[in-house]
Image (tube, helix red, strand yellow):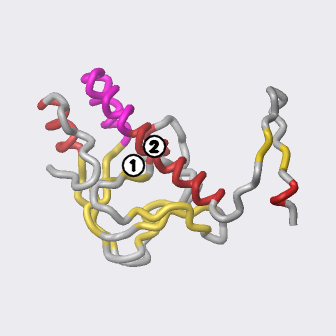
Amino acid sequence: MYFDQMDLLRGMNRDFVKAFIDLTVRDSHRKGDFLFREGDEAQYFYILLKGSVKISIGQTGHTVYRVDRPGELFGWSSLVGRDLYSASAECMEDSKLLKVENVGLERIMEEHSADGMVFYKRLAKTLGNRLLASYQMISGPWKTGVSESFGTGQVQESEATRG
């Protein structure tokens, strides 16, 4: 099994990899299908093989991320102890993906704790990169000049950035 952009299993024990692969289900969805909605029970996480999935929040469906590179994973709420998905996932085109059930994955990671730790480190790196990308997107052209808070936690807007 090969993941183009993110090889979650690279360098892991053969037994862990086999157990992981045996747990995955290949899934196909049509454009417009929802894989899950914000507030649904978080049971699976997904790895995109082909297609595009919009991750959105709120009733208006504000896009927060677009999964469009093979190997990207999403639906991570199910892996971090959250009972409910924090966003919705809608296929923006016909898509193929791997669906991984969280309870089975937790069992595998307990049985193979060293590989489970590597898996979670790789997951944390992915989520950290997305968080940084979100910060950059939010700060974009509206960057605010900031003065030091000297430990007070207060951020002061500079004169140059006031409208």
Q: Report the residue at 39% width, 39% height from top.
A: 123
Q: Report the residue at 44% width, 51% height from top.
A: 75
The answer to whether the residues at label 1 and label 2 have Cβ atoms under 8 Å apart is yes
Seen from the viewer's position, the closer of residues 140 and 18 is 140
| Residue reaching furthest to the front | 160
Q: Which residue is mark 2?
A: 78
Seen from the viewer's position, the closer of residues 83 and 154 is 154
Q: How far is the residue under mark 1 from the one under mark 2?
A: 6 Å
Q: Quadrant of residue 111?
A: top left
Count the marks: 2
Relative to residue 159, is residue 136 drawn left or right?
left
Q: Report the residue at 71% width, 62% height from top.
A: 142
Q: Report the residue at 24% width, 53% height from top.
A: 25
**Which kind of residue does numbered mark 1 sit on?**
Tyr
Q: Secondary structure at mark 1?
A: strand
Seen from the viewer's position, the closer of residues 119 and 161 is 161
Residue 88 x %, y %:
53, 61
Image height check: is 163 above or below 24? below
Seen from the viewer's position, the closer of residues 44 and 95 is 95
**Which kind of residue does numbered mark 2 sit on?**
Ser
Q: Quadrant of residue 113?
A: top left
* Residue 66 is one of the magenta-drawn residues: no
Give the magenta part as a residue range.
102-122
Q: What is the number of the mark on residue 44?
A: 1
Relative to residue 157, is residue 68 drawn left or right?
left
